[in-house]
Image (cartoon, rainbow, N blue to C red):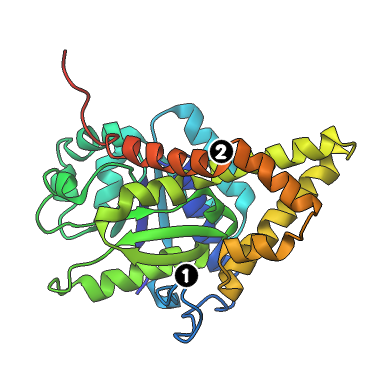
Amino acid sequence: MPYSLCVLGCGTMGISVLSGVIDNISSPLAATNALEDESAPSTPMGSMILEPKADSLPDRFIATVNRVESVKKLKKVFRELGGLGPTVQIRQGDENVKSVAESDVILLCCKPQLAESLLMVPGMSEALEGKLLISILAGTTISMMRGWVPASCTVVRSMPNTPTKIREGMTVLSTLPPSDPKSSVNREILIALFTPLGKCRFLEEKHFDAVTAVCGSGPAFVCLVLEAMADGGVMMGLPRSEALELAAQTMQGAARMVLQTGMHPAAIKDSVTTPGGCTIAGLLVLEDGRVRSTVARCIQATALHAGGLGRAPEKK
C-alpha cells in the first residue's frame, strides 16, 4: 500500500536515495537483477540480492533541510528530476516534527553527531509512534537510536552509496527481528525502496562499520584510482576526456565481470597478465608501492573511524 516518505536532513545521500526512488517510480527497471540463481558461483553477491514489489513504494515525499539556501537548491534539483520530482515537499528543519507526523516511513540522513538532538526534540517521540525509521548514519547503532525513539518505532540501519542516484548503487540493510510481526511488511518496504537503486542485501548490524568503509566510502576510493589511471594516460599522451573514458569503462567492465561471472578478481588479473608482458611490469610497480596493503588499510582505518562517528564528543 502506498505511503508517505520523509527524508530528515536531505543532504547528498538523501538526494541520491530520493532521486533514485522517484526515478524508479517514473521509469521502473526490468527485474534483471532480481534473485540470483542459487547454483551460481560462490561470490560476494550470494543469493541475497532481492526483488522489489511495486506496491510497497511511497506516493508522497517530504524532505527537510536546515537552511533557506538548501530549500531553494533542493526545489531546483527535484524540479529538474521530472516525474514525481516536483511533488516533493521541501521544508526547513523547524518543521521536522510536523513532517515526521505526516509520514509513515522516515529516512534519517543527518550528520551522525546531530541524530540525538534531532530525535529528542519536543514532540518527535509522539510523531514517531508506530513508524519505520531507516537510518543511513555511520557509527550510530540501533541500540543508541532506540534510546531516542519510542518503543513502538521500528529502527533499521541502511548503508547506501552515492551511485544510488543513477540506480547503480549498493545498499546494505540491517536484519529485521523475526519475532516482530511488522518485520514482513517492513522488509517489503525496504526491498522496494532500495533494490531498484542498484543491488541490496541484508547483513547483521555488527558488520556495518566495515560496510560503511567498503560500500559507503568506497566510491571515493575507487574514483581516486580511476583518476590516477586517467592521469597516467594523460601523462602518456592521451587527451583527458578519452583517458577518463577508457579508465572508467575498464573499471566498470572488470567489476561487472566479477558480479556477472563470479570470477575472483585475482583470476581476472591473472588472465590479463602474460609472461614477460607489460601488465606484469605495471603490477610489480603497484606491488612495490604497497598499493594492495594501502587500500586494505584504508578500509580498516575508515571502518574504525566510522565506529566513532555516532558518539558524542568527549567533554574536556
Residue 78, percent across and down? 56, 48
Q: CA distance from mark 1 to mark 2?
A: 27 Å
Q: Position of residue 276 (x, y in %)?
A: 79, 54
Residue corresponding to mark 2: 290
Judge by depth and name the residue closer to the eye, 276 or 192.
276
The correct choice, above or below, for 144 with respect to 54 in the image is above
Q: Is residue 314 left or right of residue 275?
A: left
Residue 216 location (% of width, % of height): 44, 47
Q: Which mark is first along the chain, 2 or 1?
A: 1
From this view, report whether residue 92 is shown above or below residue 124.
above
Position of 313 with respect to 278 (left or right) is left
Q: Which residue is mark 1?
A: 45
Q: In the figure, is residue 235 to the left or right of 172? A: right
276 or 307: nearer the viewer: 276
Q: Residue 259: in sight, yes or no?
A: yes
Circles 1 and 2 in contact, beta carbons < 8 Å: no
Q: Amino acid at mark 2?
A: Arg
Q: Residue at x 43, y 74 (%)?
A: 46
Q: Position of residue 9 (x, y in %)?
A: 37, 39
Tell me the residue at 16%/60% (across/down): 130
Label 2 sits on a secondary structure element that is: loop
Res. 313 image quadrant: top left
Residue appearing at x 44%, y 85% in the figure: 38
Crowding around mark 2 (Cα neighbors within 10 Å: few <14, some 14 to 19, many 20+) is few
Give the quarter of the image for residue 249.
Answer: bottom right
Secondary structure state at the residue bearing disc 1 = loop
Name the foreground residue: 220 vs 197: 220
Task: Looking at the picture, tell me which residue is in the foreground, 149 or 254.
Answer: 254
Asked if residue 106 shows in the view, the reply is no
Of the residues shown, which amino acid type is indicated by label 1? Met
Q: Which mark is residue 139?
A: none
